[in-house]
Image (cartoon, grey):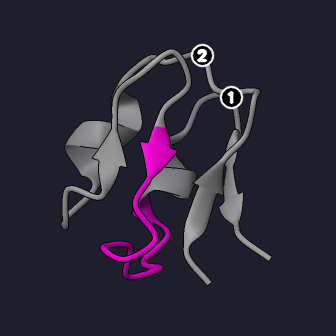
Amino acid sequence: MAYVISDDCVACGTCISECPVEAISEGDIYSINPDLCTECGTCASVCPSEAIKLGE
């Protein structure tokens, strides 16, 4: 399962620069492309608002 970004996202941009496969897109609420996500967890570990979790 790919990681997902919840509504708790504050669009700070921290996760985008940390993603090694560039799976995260900017927007009002950021999103993660599940086809690109390798489930490394780097984005979740750097998210200051803890808005990124492993999808279900």
Circle 1 sits on which residue? Answer: 49
* Residue 10, numbered circle: 2
Q: Quadrant of residue 17?
A: top left
Instruction: Find the distance from the CA under tag 2 to the CA under tag 1.
Output: 7 Å
The residue at 71%/70% (across/down) is 55
Compared across the picture, whether 23 is left or right of 15 comes to left
Compared across the picture, whether 40 is left or right of 54 comes to left
Question: Is 38 rendered above or below residue 28?
Answer: below
Q: Could you tell me residue 34's position as x and y percent?
A: 46, 71
Q: Could you tell me residue 37's position as x and y percent?
A: 38, 73
Compared across the picture, whether 43 is left or right of 23 comes to right
Element on which disc 1 rests: loop
Question: Is 24 rendered above or below residue 35?
Answer: above
Name the amino acid type tagged 1.
Ser
Pointer 2: residues within 10 angstroms few (<14), some, or many (20+)?
Answer: some
Element on which disc 2 rests: loop
The residue at 73%/40% (across/down) is 6
26 within the magenta span: no
Q: What quarter of the picture does the C terminus occupy?
A: bottom right
Q: Which residues are magenta?
A: 31-42
- Marks 2 and 1, the one that precedes in the sequence: 2
Q: Quadrant of residue 35?
A: bottom left
Name the amino acid type tagged 2.
Val
Q: Could you tell me residue 10's position as x and y percent?
A: 60, 16
Dots 2 and 1: beta carbons under 8 Å? Answer: yes
* Residue 2, numbered circle: none
Compared across the picture, whether 9 is left or right of 27 comes to right
